[in-house]
Image: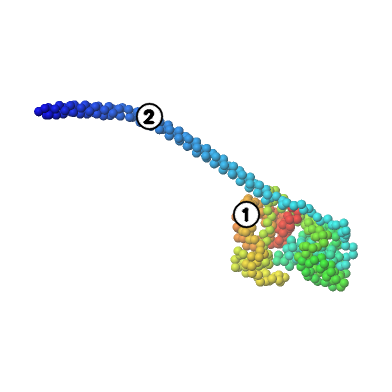
Amino acid sequence: MHRHALFRKKTRSSGIWLRLLWGFGYFGVTVATLLSVLLLPALLSKFKMQSEENHSFLHQKQVHFIQVTDDVHTQAKTNNSRRSLRSREKHLQNLWRHPPTRGFEPCVSPSKDYSGIENPRGYLLVHANGGLNQMRAGICDMVAVARLINATLVIPQLDKRSFWKDSSTFSDVFDEEYFIKSLEKDIPIVRKLPKELSTALKAHKNFRSWSSAAYYQEEITRLWDDYKVIHAAKSDSRLANNDLPSDIQKLRCRVHYDALRFAPSIEAFGRNLLERMRSKGPFIALHLRYEKDMLAFSGCSHGLSSMQMEELTRIRESTSHWRVKLIDPKEQRLKGLCPLTPKEVGIFLEALGYPSTTRIYIAAGEIYGGNYSMAALQARFPNLLNKELLASPYELAPFRRKYGPCSRGPSSLFRSLENNKS
């Protein structure tokens, strides 16, 4: 009985503690619930505000960083563009700059021991051949040859057998009076043979190509023993370039750069063309060498149609004074003996750095293939000009009457005037 009483006493004591614990727990939960309901929104609101402030601060930092980075990139890009522009401008200046002389100076004055021909032994007749530039070079050689063989030079006859059938005489193209007077201290020059020799027996000679002074002074001068007149059938490449007496080389230069002055009408016409081109800044005078006679003579046909190739072959075979008839076009091109096509010239000029706005004067005759051949060059350099675009029909009329519509005349003359006087 004592045990049961003790057990009940302990049980009642345990129940009281349990009820107290439960009451405290219920009270705690209630208080916690009330606190969460009343305080949590305020805490969340404060946290959100702080979070937004932090985010705004970070965003401002990020925007500032991005802006600074963009500014640096933009500045670097601007600096690069300026450097690139300055580099291009400098390159263009170099393109138009005259080539360096490297210390060389004109040296055409004769030496102290040089004197004119006192007793010429006979007369030298010359038939110049080829295009205008070939004939100019040939005439320079023939003046030197006349000096070497003690001859009086008769005013040369220009080529009338060429593909272009140009009927020009020496006085049509060059200032004949000035030619005679400017060389009077070098060789005697007459306009035509004396009457008494017009029917005399002549030594017709095709001078050997690239010959030395000794060839003319020894082999050719022997002809004076039997003849009073020596006729040179051709003038191109008849005199060597090297190992000639200094006074002979100087004489050639004096002829080319002084004595062979163009006729006054041509000189004035050429000056007008040059002034019109130069009035808008620097320009390129381009001789393409892409004319029908050049392609037919050289046998070059790269990029041409089969019909064009056949036409060029017929021209070459029917021109009797062109010796070589069978030509392999591919082999010619591989050897570098062909002119560049207009397209290749455009690529070349572009690679050199000339801008597409560059003005180009086409100093040549009719381009073979016409607009079709010129299309690729025109696409790269639209500002292509020629004498027909620069001069009026009235200004061209005198030359058309003389040279004909397809002649080399004015174009070749402009090209030579540009090379000789610029």
In this rendering, the label closer to the viewer, 1 or 2: 2
Asked which quadrant contains residue 307, the reply is bottom right
- As shown in the figure, which amino acid type bears the numbered disc 2? Lys
Vertical placement of 223 versus 370: above or below?
below
Of the pair 353 and 181, the residue shown nearer to us: 353
Q: Percent x, y for residue 290?
A: 66, 62
Residue at the spot 68% in from the left edge and 67% down from the top edge: 297
Q: Which of 249 and 298 is in front in this view?
A: 249
Report if residue 392 is visible in the image: no
**Helix, strand, or loop for circle 1?**
helix
Outermost residue, left side: 1
Specify whether 104 is left or right of 25.
Answer: right
Residue count near mark 2 (Cα–Cα under 10 Å), binned few <14, some 14–19, many ≥20: few
Q: Where is residue 196 in the image (x, y as percent from the top left)?
A: 88, 69
Mark number for residue 351?
1
Does the CB distance between marks 1 and 2 fall below 8 Å? no
Q: Is mark 2 on a helix, strand or loop?
A: helix
Q: Which label was assigned to residue 46?
A: 2
Relative image position of residue 286 (x, y in whole percent): 68, 56
Distance from disc 1 to disc 2, alpha carbons, whole Å, reads: 69 Å
Q: Image quadrant of residue 267?
A: bottom right
